[in-house]
Amino acid sequence: MKKYILIFFVIISFVVTSCYNDKKETLFPSLVACDSTQYLFKTYILPMINSNCNGCHNNQAPILNSYVNIEINASSMYNDIVSGKMPQGGTPLDDCSKKMFKKWMDHGMPNN
């Protein structure tokens, strides 16, 4: 009987100490839902363009260094991003970034 009690406590100890609480975002970053409701130009869209496009398009056509230039080229930019044509030679934008850009366009490309 003592043997079974000892085995029981060993198993319980193992179960209790092996349980931990990790965040889903840390363990499975690709499964975290994209918050495409965040499509503010100055907070999300412009930094995305600055980090992914302006390596080339700060000094070659189309120039993407201002809101007006980005707004004028938004439709062709989106098509090039979705098709994988851009960023040329760079890492493709993740799906969340594409959704944010599309949402920004669909809501009239506000300069917010």
Image (cartoon, rainbow, N blue to C red):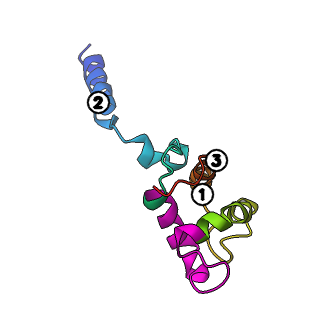
Mark 1 Cα within 10 Å, few/some/many (few <14, many 20+)? few
- Placement of the C terminus among the 4 image quadrants: bottom left
Circles 2 and 1: CB distance less than 8 Å? no
x and y percentages locating residue 100 in the rendered image? 57, 51
Q: Disc 3 on helix, strand or loop? A: helix
Which of the two labelled residues, at mark 1 and mark 3, occupies the earlier sequence position?
Answer: 1
Q: Bounds of the magenta span?
A: 43-68
Dot label at residue 106: 3
Residue 48 is situated, as x and y percent measured from the top left of the image, at: 52, 64
| Crowd rating for badge 2 (residues with CA inside 10 Å; few <14, some 14–19, many 20+) | few
* Placement of 75 over or under 89, stated as above or below: above
Residue with the most extreme front position: 68
What is the x, y in percent for residue 17?
28, 35
Q: Mark 2 to mark 1: distance in Å?
A: 38 Å
Secondary structure under badge 2?
A: helix
Query: What residue is pinned by disc 1?
Result: 94
Dot 2 or dot 1, earlier in sequence: 2
Amino acid type at circle 2 is Val
Q: Tell me the residue at 71%/59% (across/down).
A: 82
Compare residues 63 and 83 and report the one nearer the observer. 63
Q: Do the residues bearing badges 3 and 2 touch, measured as CB atoms within 8 Å?
A: no
Q: Is residue 109 visible?
A: yes
Task: Say which residue appears at 59% left-offset and 46% top-offset.
Answer: 107
Inter-mark Cα distance, 3 to 2? 50 Å
Mark 1 or 3, closer to the camera: 3
Looking at the image, residue 4 sits to the left or right of residue 26; the answer is left
Task: Name the quadrant of the N terminus.
Answer: top left
Q: Which residue is mark 2?
A: 16
Q: Residue 86 appears in which quarter of the rendering?
A: bottom right
